[in-house]
Image (cartoon, rainbow, N blue to C red):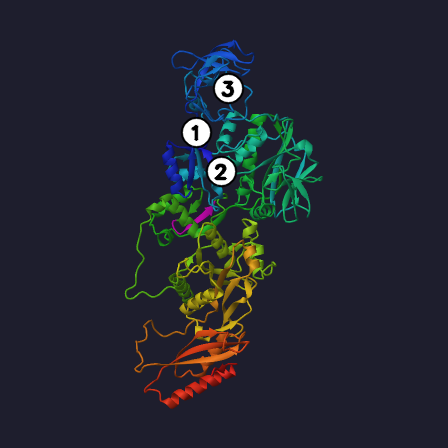
Amino acid sequence: MKFTVSWLKDHLDTDADLDGILDTLTAIGLEVEGVENPGEKLADFRIAKVISAAKHPNADKLQLLTVDTGEGDPVQVVCGAPNARAGMTGVFAAPGTYVPGIDMTLKPAKIRDVESFGMMCSERELELSDAHEGIIDLGEDSGAEVGEAYAHWAGLDDPVIDIAITPNRQDCMGVRGVARDLAAAGLGTLKPLQVPDIEGEGAADIAIRTDDPEGCPAFFGRTVSGVMNGASPAWMQKRLRAIGQKPISALVDITNYIMIDHGRPLHVYDRAKLGAALFARRASDGENVLALNGKSYRLDATMTVIADDEGVHDIGGIMGGEHSSVQPETTEIVIECAYFDPETIALTGQRLGLASDARTRFERGVDPAFLDDGLAIATQMVLDICGGSASEVVRAGTPPEGTKTLRYDPQLCATLGGLDVPIDRQRASLESLGFTVEGDGPFTVTVPSWRRDIDGAPDFVEEVLRLERFDSIPSVALPRAEGVARPTASPEQKRERTVRRAAAARGLNEAVTWSFISQDEAALSGDSSDSGAPWALANPISEEMKVMRTSMIPGLAAAAKRNADRGAASIQLFEVGRRYLEDAEHPTLGLILAGARSPRHWQGGGAPFDAFDAKAEALAILDAAGAPVDKLQLFGETSGLYHPGRSGRLCLGPKNTLAEFGELHPATLKALDLDGPAMAAEIFLDAIPMPKATGGHMRAAYAPPALQAVTRDFAFLIDADAPAGDLLRAVKNAEKQHLAEARIFDIFEGEHVPEGKKSVAIELTLQPGERSFTDEELKAISDTVVAAAQKAGGELRG
């Protein structure tokens, strides 16, 4: 929301300087985003008078001007403007002046062998407009003094303030609303609103109605005949240009001006291009309209439009149509001042992908009680600038009741806001903002029609605190209970912290990627349909961020690619986040390994990561998370992201998958534009069983075994394609009483091993209890292990 200081002072009687205005705006919640001073770039331009004008001796279209700049002797200027003449007053730029319209710093020059010292400027050269037919002519009665700074004389040194308006402050989408807030904050006095009383000259020659009371509850309008749609006044153009609005014509500029001035969008139609009636209705499916931005929009039955019997002329509350727009030859107009439902406007704008200043205001909610006043102000401005005669007002429908009455206990300011403000001061603050306050506390407060955001007592607390300044709230430490603080993190949060530390401790670098991916990336893991990627965005930032991620891998792969493109030789990334599936969101740790496992070295190194590296990381993180790693089963079927035969699932039973790991499929690498090979894993944190409560936070006492452990090695022959993990699991389950650890330390295929077989060597660590093992006990344990291995398909090697 932009406005100039002089514009603000049309509504606010204040002596505050610019810094005071800026400080107060930010203090009351209207954060200042920037301040521009257009006059700064024109500070060196001076008003000058042409004393004489003679023909250039060497050019037919050039003149030699003698110019009085107000600083010393007159100077000679070569000028090609056709309107240059003796006696005229214009704008002069001396040598050394930067001219923004031509991006040039002037210096003395010879033009056709005649010296020129500076230039007389056009409006385009000063970036005031596109006019370049001649130099600026201030006129004989301008009152401009030679030598005076042009920016000051023209009022171009009026600072432009840009403030951020939060969605709940629709009342500050107009300059008057901002002035009301500043006046309430003590920065001045709000000037009375001057609403003209216009007597209509006969009935309007067009019927106005609303056939869509939900989308357009109220449609007020009137006709004005005999208008002349020329250029708007210079003061209006200057203000509109200052805030970034391009002046178009008097009628269009008037509606834009009132929208900024009062936060009230309006629209004007060329009456000659309309039928006998103008009305609000729902669009028909497939109906089209050519909007004022030159684009055609296809409408549907959820959208409110303004139309006549021939077709649509306006996307209600968002943008007018090209067909009925006013032109320089327009002599009769219809002024529309309507109230549109905010939700309908927002949905229509989203569906069409169409943004406008009017939509910004209507979807936040304009003042429903300002229709008559807004129409009267617009009509008077049209009559003053364009002439003509206005008809009587036609009112169709009824705007919603904008006021509401709520109860407010002033004591809440201290309990909710932390600042004890006297009751009388709270009353004064609310009344200065336009609220009607009755009672001595609790108050009965009537909310004004322009404050759609006020719903309850906490909103009144906020209003009081805004005017008291939030900086006034004292900083008070939260009370702390005596004794040991209780833990506040949930078990799930603790688990996420644990796995994050575990992954980082293993040398992985944490990444933070987008939670959105494209539809094609979702399809890589088998979630290609709308039902498979249910968390789709209705209004995505781009097609590459259309659905909520169903896997952590696409985001990590993009991060890996960025690192690889910048020369990273070994990429080890992980991320803790959420996957968004059909049933819910699932906490997940994803990791990706790409490039070399270790740097190249003359003793070795430089080898790429393989699937077993991903498996090792997954097992280590699962172990840190408290998963029963020794009970996990390995299954081969994985999602479409992974290479079949080089990937697997770690499960507690066939249906409870705790993790997936392996080499990414070549098709996945191609789709993600990542050079392979690359390994990845996902640990599904919500699938890991929570440990049973121990009844306290104390660690168990350290009790090392009293007797030395015994190790025994076994070598078994199994089928070459059989998982070695199945054999290890069978051995572990064979002797649970004394078996402390079992691990595979060698797998061999080749000489002395039958074809189609492989040798798997397992080391067992047996821990005696109260006494040492006897030979007979060790033999019995060995026989049990061998029998279990044979049952699992293993044969003891001789």
What's the magenta region? 440-447
Choose mark 3 or mark 1, whichever is in front. 3
Residue at the extreme right: 310
State which tag comes first along the sequence, 3 or 2: 3
Tell me the kind of residue under disc 3.
Answer: Ile
Residue 134: image quadrant is: top right
Tell me the kind of residue under disc 1.
Answer: Asp
Does 443 lie within the magenta span? Answer: yes
Taking the image as drawn, is residue 222 in sight?
Answer: yes
Q: Are marks 2 and 1 in contact (CB under 8 Å)?
A: no
Per the model, the C-alpha gap separating discs 2 and 1 is: 18 Å
Q: Secondary structure at mark 1?
A: loop
State which tag comes first along the sequence, 3 or 1: 3
Graded by Cα atoms within 10 Å as few (under 14), some (14 to 19) or many (20 or more), the crowding at tag 3 reads many
Q: Secondary structure at mark 3?
A: loop
**What percent of the width, then of the height, locates residue 250?**
57, 28
Residue at the extreme bottom: 776
The residue pinned by badge 3 equals: 136
Q: Which label belongs to residue 158?
A: 1
Along the line of sight, which residue is nearer the eye, 86 or 315?
86
